[in-house]
Amino acid sequence: MPDHAEPTQSTPPSADSAAGVGASRRPVEAVLFDFHGTLAQVEEPHDWVLAAARACGVALERVRATALADRLLTAGRAGGPLPARVPPALAELWAERDLYPHAHRGAYTGLAATVDAGIDGLADALYERVLRPDGWVPYPDTAPTLAALRSAGVKVAVVSNIGFDLRPFFAAWGLDALVDAFVLSYEVGRCKPDPAIFWRACGMLGVDAERALMVGDTAADAGAVRAGCATLLLPEAEPGRPNGLGSVLDLALRG
């Protein structure tokens, strides 16, 4: 069972941090990064389906893979858009998906199984792609941004609502030495936007929340404002395309 994060401080957010510009007015000692949609994106949907089908011993035509991917995205994909509908039988797993690995797997394999693809084992094979580093694509600015922060002595944490370990991904990409801490919801028992998960990250890095910048792409990431952190939200970008991550350096190093 995950442990439960306890706030290390309770300083209310200032007007600057609420506006997301506080980092330009005071030193930034740490940057907290969301993972999905910020540092990396899941592979293209048709590639996801083609690879999973191959793992099941089935070679799909690209047109069929694309059509099947559209149906699976509507049902709900880990790392993709929220499902159009969560069946009642999966409601409990869905509610706890970012707190327990079994719930994360059960929720997403269950959603995939609602799509009749005619391929035995496809739901599990699709989920296995999410657990593989080659099932994700780091954004172009991820490595240079993390390297620049490390060179400048700015600490880095990855703060993610997720039901599996991200450390092997960063090791496979050669980026593990650039991250000081991983704060994963299923390990700490709290999910964004709960301020406790951001306090936990700051505590692990040994910095005060008002000296930290949270970088993400969703309203859940903006919850860091309630913890006292400055916040930067990036625009959505497709796999392999720039998402503005380099702007973090303007705030953290040149503000």
Image (cartoon, rainbow, N blue to C red):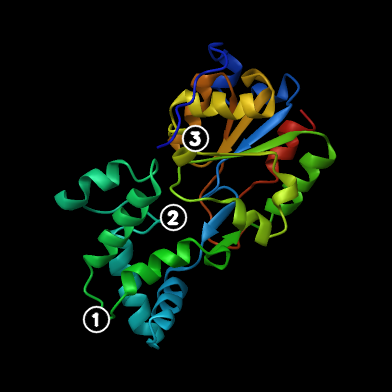
Q: Circle 3: is it few (<14), some (14-19), or many (20+) Cα within 10 Å? A: many
Q: Position of residue 112 (x, y in %)?
A: 29, 64
Disc 3: which residue: 221
Quarter placement of the N terminus: top left
| Residue 122 as seen in the image, left or right of residue 131 | left
- For label 2, the SS is loop
Q: Position of residue 151 (x, y in %)?
A: 84, 41
Name the kind of residue labelled 1 in the image. Gly
Which of the 4 quarters of the picture holds residue 30? top right
- For label 3, the SS is helix
Disc 1: which residue: 118
Name the kind of residue labelled 2 in the image. Gly
Q: Residue furthest left?
A: 88
The residue under the point 21% across, 65% down is 114
The residue under the point 59% across, 23% down is 229
| Residue 95 as seen in the image, left or right of residue 189 | left
- For label 1, the SS is loop
Examine the rendered structure and indicate whether residue 46 appears above or below residue 144. below
Disc 2: which residue: 79
